[in-house]
Image (cartoon, rainbow, N blue to C red):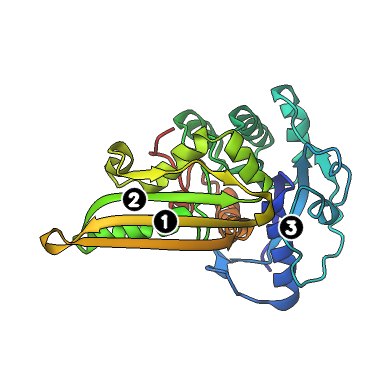
Amino acid sequence: MIERVKLAVVGVGNNTSALVQGLALHHQSGSLVGIRRPTIDGLGVGDIDIVAAFATSEEKIGRDLTEAIFLAPNNFPRLECDLPRAGVPVTKGLVDASEVQRVAAALAGAEVLLYSAPSGRPETAQAYAEAAHTAGVAFINTTSDPVARDPRWIDRFEAAGLPLLGDDLASQFGTSVLHNALLRLLEERGLTLVSSYQVNLGGTEDFRNLVENPDTKKQSKLNALSAADGTVQADGTVQLAPLGYLSQLKSQKIAHLNIEAQGWGGTAVSLDVKLRVHDPSGAAGVNIDLIRLAASAFRNGRGGFLAEASPLLKSPPGTVV
């Protein structure tokens, strides 16, 4: 029988709520709905135990993880499943880099640390990467803050034999994935791109934070839309509107995409698409694969970035920092 993955999570927000509830639903029903890879290197979707959780919200600290995921401002809906107590109290997260040793000690017994805090806090992301490195566990950065695409961090984790995955999730079926696919389709079919844009609106705290701290997220989205030679982001043909936060959307995201192109003889082609998804579900659907990839590599002593994780990320190594 395969040993279950020991996972620690940073951030007890909507993305963690979607992951925790989705794991419980899978355990109880065995459903493979919304699951791309039932097994990865022998690890099934249900072969994951969360052993530690970190947050900075005073309301969540000390609560059982299965209670904390439903506290405001979280707004991901309750899934149709029983959710027994996890027996994992939420621990106070890093306040500054001086607490790396405390967090590293709290990671004892974990194999993988999933960093799922809000983007726009690069010093915090790097402090948790330091804690993971000190504790000897794999690190997954789901945010747009540059860690796993920084050669210095890659070299350190590779030398230690520890997997380092990131940066920024390419949501299971999100705006960047859809937009990229449509742009590549135009290219494959021989059409000439004239212009394109995307508009994203959401109601989670992550969205609100990104409205206030948009820089790394905008670059990460541009990375996800770039052609191999970087021309899409360089020439301004593809544009991103500033992110919009609307609390009434709750955990849903609405995206609008437009593509203007020319076909044979310069005739016009115009495409408008509206996408509505639960953003945290899109994150959990990718995290479930990243966690198992990291755990398998950890157990096999494969350090540094894992090339097989690249399709699941917006800004893997080689993209703009």
Neighbour tally class for label 1: few under 14, some 14-19, many 20 plus, Cα within 10 Å: many
Identify which amino acid the numbered label 2 is placed on. Ser
Please state, as top left, top right, bottom left or bottom right, where the C terminus lies in the image. top left
Q: Nearer the viewer, mark 1 or mark 3?
A: 1
The circle on residue 49 is 3
Query: Is residue 18 or residue 155 the one in the foreground?
Result: 18
Q: Which residue is mark 1?
A: 257
Q: Secondary structure at mark 3?
A: strand
Identify which amino acid the numbered label 3 is placed on. Asp
Q: Secondary structure at mark 1?
A: strand
Identify which amino acid the numbered label 1 is placed on. Leu
Q: Are marks 2 and 1 in contact (CB under 8 Å)?
A: yes
Q: Is 113 displayed left or right of 146 in the figure?
A: right
Q: Earlier in the sequence, mark 1 or mark 3?
A: 3
Q: Is 205 displayed left or right of 255 in the figure?
A: right
Neighbour tally class for label 2: few under 14, some 14-19, many 20 plus, Cα within 10 Å: many
Neighbour tally class for label 3: few under 14, some 14-19, many 20 plus, Cα within 10 Å: some
At a point 83% along the width and 45% down the height, the residue shown is: 90
Residue 66 image position (x, y, % from top left): 82, 57
Q: Is residue 139 above or below residue 65?
A: above
Q: Earlier in the sequence, mark 2 or mark 1?
A: 2
At a point 71% along the width and 47% down the height, the residue shown is: 8
Give the CA separation, mark 2 to mark 1. 7 Å
Please state, as top left, top right, bottom left or bottom right, where the N terminus lies in the image. bottom right
Give the CA separation, mark 3 to mark 2. 43 Å
Q: Earlier in the sequence, mark 3 or mark 2?
A: 3
Query: Is residue 272 or residue 153 the one in the foreground?
Result: 272
Q: Which residue is mark 2?
A: 196
At a point 46% along the width and 47% down the height, the residue shown is: 314
